[in-house]
Amino acid sequence: MPIYDFLCSECGTKRPVMVDYEAKKGLELICVQCGGVMRAMPVAMFNLIRSTKDKPPIERKVKACGHTHHCQCAAIKQSKPNPFQKQIDEALGNAENQ
Ligand SMILES: [Zn+2]
Ligand SMILES: [Zn+2]
């Protein structure tokens, strides 16, 4: 059974209530805080609050490569072989032989 947020029209108290969709449409609850009438919050409004809350903040940081979007420049740089790798290997190989 889905859970809907019921909102008090008098004091704004929210309360999650487990009720099925058909039943919640005509359902009115008594607010425990003020005795006012609580009604199910419109689902559309609930979704709107959720979607804006979950949205990640837009980052506009300029990277070292000059791009502001998610680029692969850093990944390419890292996968590029070290131009001195051969010399390093030779040096290490020589060291082992000695
Ligand atoms: Zn209330
Ligand atoms: Zn880039």
Image (spheres, rainbow, N blue to C red):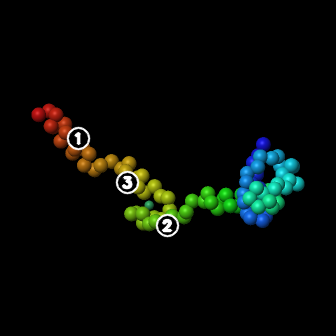
Tell me the residue that label 1 is attached to: 89
Residue at image coords 55%, 63% = 57
Using the numbered discs, state the Cα–Cα distance from disc 1 to disc 3 in whole angstroms: 21 Å
What is the distance, in whole Å, between disc 1 and disc 2 at their CAs?
A: 41 Å
| Callout 2: SS | loop
Amino acid of disc 2: Arg
Asked whether the residues under the numbered discs 1 and 2 touch, taking CB atoms below 8 Å apart as contact, a structural biologist would say: no
**Percent coordinates x, y for residue 53 in the rendering:** 62, 60
Q: Are marks 3 and 2 in contact (CB under 8 Å)?
A: no
Query: On the rendered image, what quadrant is the C terminus found in?
Result: top left
How far across and down, in percent of the image, does residue 69 sit?
50, 62
Residue underneath mark 3: 77
Q: Quadrant of residue 7?
A: bottom right
User: Disc 3 beta carbon < 8 A from ligand 2?
Assistant: no
Q: Position of residue 12 (x, y in %)?
A: 73, 63
The answer to whether residue 98 of the structure is visible from this angle is: yes
Which of the two labelled residues, at mark 3 and mark 2, occupies the earlier sequence position?
2
Which element type, helix, strand or loop, lies under badge 3?
Answer: helix
Verify CB contact (< 8 Å) between mark 1 and mark 3.
Answer: no
Left or right of 98 in this view: 22: right
Q: Which residue is mark 2?
A: 60
The single residue placed furthest to the top in the displayed view is 97
- Which of the two discs, 1 and 2, labels the residue nearer the N terminus? 2
